[in-house]
Image (cartoon, rainbow, N blue to C red):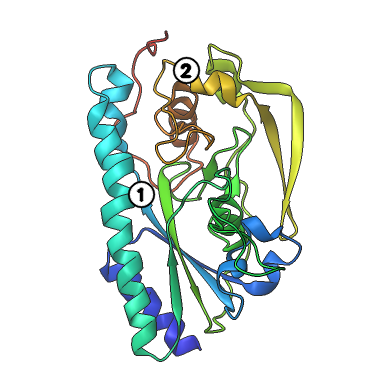
């Protein structure tokens, strides 16, 4: 299986993927069925997480307050619907050509309720949407930051993921040991709505990796006028905070402190941010 993993790594690099991780089935033991990818493919053995960066420049217009639509295109809609989707489809073909079944999955929000009835007793009702945050941590490519955002060691919060489940038993990626988020609390301090609590916290345990996450008031995030957007896929889904003031402040801090690998010649923020 090492040769197959190497072939996948070569493919991912050629396809322009920025993040790649492998999670074995046992890391999902105990995860509720409606959030578990192996509910979709019970014979599967490995979850493969494909990540592509949100280019920092796609957030520039939001940071300046001068252009919001192009982030929605390049940093969200096209990134998920086209750039990542094509790579996910092509990786599925690579695995099928090697004789392994592969199930491509889109990051639909887990908050979406069932939209049908179970086909037989004991089965989950359709549609089951796996938890991509859980899977990214289980695949060793990310942690959950204090803000609740998914941070990688290379880009901090600036990536989005697609998933492939396969019945090939591939070598696992070690869980991310390095803590990317340093719990500086600037995410909470920068939020004009006080949506991220500095005192109320939850301990999130994913495959044995424990992370401290501040309690988030998603209702306040949905009302945010500082770059946050409603979930485009379902009204009950988590708001998109990628371009929100809190997350842009995180990006600035991570770059300044060299806590991530992808840093730039010039700082992202050179003056006080706009706030509404």
Report if the CB atoms under discs 1 and 2 are less than 8 Å apart. no
Q: Where residue 270 appears, x then y in whole percent?
A: 33, 18
- Residue 121 sits in which quadrant? bottom right
Viewer-closest of 33 and 175: 33
Disc nearer the start of the sequence (1/2): 1
Q: Where residue 152 appears, x then y in whole percent?
A: 50, 50
Residue beneath label 2, please?
224
Image vertical order of residue 15 relative to residue 127, above or below: below
Q: Residues within 10 Å of mark 1 (few under 14, many from 20)?
A: many
Q: As drawn, is 238 to the left or to the right of 83?
A: right
Viewer-closest of 147 and 41: 41
- Residue 195 sits in which quadrant? top right
Q: As drawn, is 247 to the left or to the right of 173?
A: left
Q: Residues within 10 Å of mark 2 (few under 14, many from 20)?
A: many
Q: Where residue 34 appears, x then y in whole percent?
A: 64, 56
Image vertical order of residue 188 relative to residue 134, above or below: above
Q: Is residue 25 at least partly visible in the picture?
A: yes
Name the outermost residue toward the bottom: 99
Residue beneath label 1, please?
53
Q: Where residue 54 appears, x then y in whole percent?
A: 34, 44
Residue at 53% x, 11% y is 192
Q: Secondary structure at mark 2?
A: loop
Between the residue at mark 1 and the residue at mark 2, the CA separation in whole angstroms equals 24 Å
How many numbered marks, from 0 up?
2
């Amino acid at each position: 299986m090492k040769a197959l993993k190497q072939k996948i790594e070569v493919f991912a690099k050629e396809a322009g993927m920025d993040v790649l991780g492998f999670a074995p089935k046992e890391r999902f033991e105990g995860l509720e069925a409606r959030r578990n990818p192996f509910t979709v493919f019970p014979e599967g053995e490995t979850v493969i997480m494909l990540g592509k960066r949100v280019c920092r420049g796609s957030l520039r217009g939001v940071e300046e307050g001068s252009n919001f639509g192009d982030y929605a295109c390049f940093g969200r809609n096209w990134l998920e619907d086209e750039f990542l989707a094509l790579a996910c489809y092509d990786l599925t073909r690579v695995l099928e050509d090697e004789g392994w079944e592969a199930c491509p999955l889109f990051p639909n929000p887990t908050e979406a309720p069932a939209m049908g009835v179970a086909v037989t007793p004991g089965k989950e009702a359709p549609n089951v949407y796996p938890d991509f945050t859980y899977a990214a941590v289980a695949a060793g490519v990310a942690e959950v930051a204090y803000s609740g955002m998914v941070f990688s060691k290379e880009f901090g919060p600036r990536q989005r993921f697609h998933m492939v489940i396969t019945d090939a038993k591939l070598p696992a990626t070690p869980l991310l040991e390095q803590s990317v988020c340093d719990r500086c609390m600037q995410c909470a301090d920068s939020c004009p709505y006080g949506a991220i609590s500095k005192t109320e916290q939850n301990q999130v345990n994913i495959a044995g990796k424990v992370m401290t996450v501040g309690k988030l008031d998603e209702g306040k995030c949905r009302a945010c006028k500082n770059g946050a957007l409603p979930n485009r896929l379902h009204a009950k889904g988590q708001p998109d905070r990628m371009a929100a003031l809190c997350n842009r402040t995180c990006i600035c801090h991570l770059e300044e402190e060299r806590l991530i690998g992808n840093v730039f010649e010039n700082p992202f923020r050179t003056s006080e941010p706009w706030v509404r």
